[in-house]
Structures are given as structure tokens and as C-alpha cells.
Image: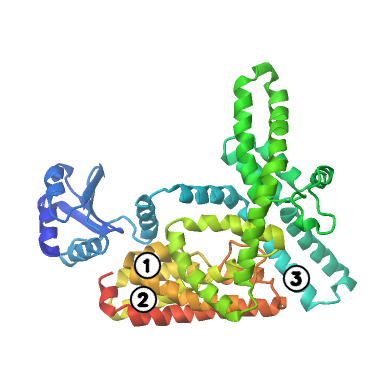
Amino acid sequence: MNDKQLLDKIFEFVGGKENITAATNCMTRLRLDVKSDNEINEEELKKVEGVLGIVHDKANYIEVVVGPGKCRKLADMCQEMGIPASKVATDNDWQENKKAVKQNQKESKIKSMFKTFGEIFIPLLPGVIAAGLCAGIASLIAQVYPGYADHKVLVVIHTLLSLINQAMLAYLTAWAGYRAAEKFGGTPILGGMLGMITSLDGINVISQTIGLYNEAQPLDAILRAGRGGVLAVVIGAWVLVKVEKFIRKRMPDSLDIVFTPLLTLICTLVPYILIVMPATGFISTALVKIVEVVCMSSNPVVRVFAGFISSALFLPMVAMGMHHGLVALYTVQLEALGYVTLFPALAMAGAGQVGAAIAIYFKCKKTNNGRLKKVISGALPAGFLGIGEPLIYGVTLPMGKPFITAGIGAGFGGAFVMAMQVAATTWGPSGLLATFVMTAGPHGVTTTMIYYLIGLVISYVMGFIVTNIFVKDEEVSQA
């Protein structure tokens, strides 16, 4: 049946048009407020061709699942018939849309593992961002004022900024161990101690004693302080929690507080130092090398291609929840090198969305789609500042095609910043807010920041152009 026939059938089994007081939609559902709940015939409504399901969990309100696109058309038809928009605000429909998308995604083991890494490191993000910003500003001071050491005020400011950065990076393994043990259900401080031990010089003493240390090239040693980094710590914390729970079950209550932590650390540290740290060290080194070979390749063609592909594919990764896996890679690279090379290109994804949304905004004005125009107006300021979810789940993903064109537009900006070898002192902030963390790489601080801003502009412009070419006015009018 066509949309009009479907709507008539829905009306028939919710008590008729006269029983409906308001109507609107989310990503897949037609939302209806009704006068009398008793007029709703759920059984017959479920049988209607085109009705995929219903949600009727509160009085005088029902949601009819009809699928993406169609729900918007039915809501518009209701308003054309004189039924007012629902009292439920539509400005934040992106949150409902996000929830609907996530509910339909399968939780694979790999995705679950990525999500776990994200949950461990996301609470650390404020510190990582603060440290990265301080490192960027300190570098900027040193470049703009080469003789800053002669000015006491600048020396104090530069030292404070450096201290904040060092407080995060020097003890990153400890923070990661604390959070990992907490996440896995163990005693957080024991995980923090495990992480701290990872970076202490005593590891080098053990390595020298058992013949695993490389005096000529310490960084190439099979076992050394910091070997495996946060990757080792997360795996070690998981082992530690398993050991702790095993011991606690068998430990008398009167002895638990003294002997459980002691035995847990002793039993965990031996396999952790001798097996986990060397094994994850090889993995961490390989990951960093692979990213370095691609992102900082001496061949500009390789960098351009890598930047375009990674930026273009980042939005789908976000929508599928796969981007959490990158947190571990960022952290490993930040710990090993002091900067992150992949993140600047991926930050272009949000800028491509901004450009796509601006193109759709002008099409909304042309086609009189006031609802979508209002959503874009509310989401764009956040988009410029690097907060992309309102645009993803409120505009581009529900429409479909703009989600693709935004990624293509972002690819051009990603290709540029990777070609220019822009590197960041942290990850997290994107958009305009990320400018002051884009201060690492082979170029000067100011030049690198300018390259990053040029990349944003390229992504804005190309996102706008590609969307304007491939998204038709009638698609926007029906969105």
C-alpha cells in the first residue's frame, strides 16, 4: 500500500484522526499522542502491512515502527492534515537516532574488545587532553619566544605546562593499570601498582640479570622498562584480577586484607614481566612502525592515499562503534613517540560533516524543510567545535547519502594534513578546538597548526561541494 493508505490504516486502529492530538517522528517511528488510550487496537495495528512493530509502554502515547524515511513522510502528512507536531522535542532526535542505530548493531567479540579499551581509556581523556594542550602551548612559547629562558615569568609558565604534560605521560601506565583493574572488577590500586612497576628501572635490572637486556640498543631489548606499555598493562591487569579473585575465594576473611594483595601481586608479576611485557612489546613496536611507515612515509603519494582512506572511513567506524579500538593505538603511539600521527587525519571527518550539513541547510531553505533546517542550525556550532554526534545521528546518517558524501569530503582534508605530516600531542578534541594540540611533526609548531586549519577548510569546502553534487533537492525536501 502507498503512504496515504498506510496512514489511513494506522489512523483506523488508533481511534481515528479525531483521537490523535499530536504527531512527530524519530529515526524509524511515527510517534502519536492520543486522547483515549482505550481506542488503540494493538493486535490489528500489528497486522497492518508496512507496520514493522509498535511501542506502547505509556498511556495516551504510541510509537508505530514503519522504517527510516517513511516515518518522516507520515509525520509530514499528519501535519498537512492539521495534526500538530508532538510535544516531544525533535531537536534532540539525534540521540534517539543514535540509540536506534546502536540497538541494531551486533556485539561481536572484536567490537566488544574495542569497546573495553574505550571504557578503560575514556575516563583518562581529560588528563590526556590537558597534557597534550599544555605540551602544544609550551612548544608554541618556545618557538615564538626562543629566548624565553631569560624571562622568569615565561620560564615559570613553560615549566608548569611541562609538568602537567609529564605528570600524564610519565605515569600513563599507572593510570591505565588503575582503570583496567577497576573495569575488570578488581582492586584498582593493585592495577595502578602493576602499571607503575612496568615503567620502573627495576625491570632493567631483572632484564640484565636474566640476559634479556641489550646494552648497545636498550630500546631493542626483549625486556626493558616500559616494554609493552599500556597494551601490556591492560592484559596484565586482566590477569591480575583473575588471580586476585582466585586467591580471595580461598583466603580466610581475617587474613584477606593483608595476604590477598601481597600474593596477587607476587603471583601476577612473574608471568607479567617475563611473558606479557616481552610479547606485547613486539606487538606495540609493530603497531607503531606500521603507522609510522604509512602516516609519516617519505613517499607523499603513500601519505595522501592513507590520509584520504582513513578520513573517509572514520565516520562509518564511529557509527559502528569500532573507533574505540583506535584509542589503544593512539595511546601506544603517544607513549612511544610523544605524539600521535593518525589522529589529525581522522579529525577531518567531523569537518567533512560540517560541509555536508551546510550544503543540506541551503537545500532546506530552497525546499522549505523547516524541521531539518532547525536541526542543522542547532547542531552546526557543535560540529565546528568537533562534536559530531548531533550531525551524524540527526542529519547525515538518517538521510544516508550525505553520510557518504561527508566522508568523501573529509578524505580530501585528511589527505592534505597527512601529506603535510601534521602530528598531534594528544587525541580527543577535534574541529577548531584541536588547533592547539596539532603542534608535533617535522615542521614548526605554527606551520603545523596552519596546515591543520587548512585541512579543516578543505574538508568543509569539499564536504559542501560533494554533497551539493550528489544530494538532490527532492531528497532533502523528503528528509
Q: Which residue is mark 3?
A: 139
Q: Earlier in the sequence, mark 2 or mark 1?
A: 2
Q: Are marks 2 and 1 in contact (CB under 8 Å)?
A: yes
Q: Which residue does the image show at 60% across and 39% down from the upper left?
A: 238
Q: Earlier in the sequence, mark 2 or mark 3?
A: 3
Residue 102, image x, y percentages: 39, 53
Crowding near the residue tagged with mark 2, few <14, some 14–19, many ≥20 C-alpha atoms within 10 Å:
many
Tell me if residue 191 comes above or below residue 310 in the rendering: above
Horizontal and vertical percent position of residue 219? 77, 57
Question: Gap in Å between the C-alphas at discs 2 and 1?
Answer: 9 Å
Label 2 to label 3: alpha-carbon separation: 39 Å
Quarter the C terminus occupies: bottom left
Q: Which mark is residue 395?
A: 1
In this view, the residue farthest toward the front is 211
Nearer-the-camera pick, 8 or 327 = 327
- Give the side of residue 257 with respect to residue 430, left or right: right
Residue 360 disc label: 2
Image marks 1 and 3: residues in contact by CB distance under 8 Å: no
Q: Secondary structure at mark 3?
A: helix
Distance between the Cα atoms at labels 1 and 3?
38 Å
SS of the residue at dot 1? helix
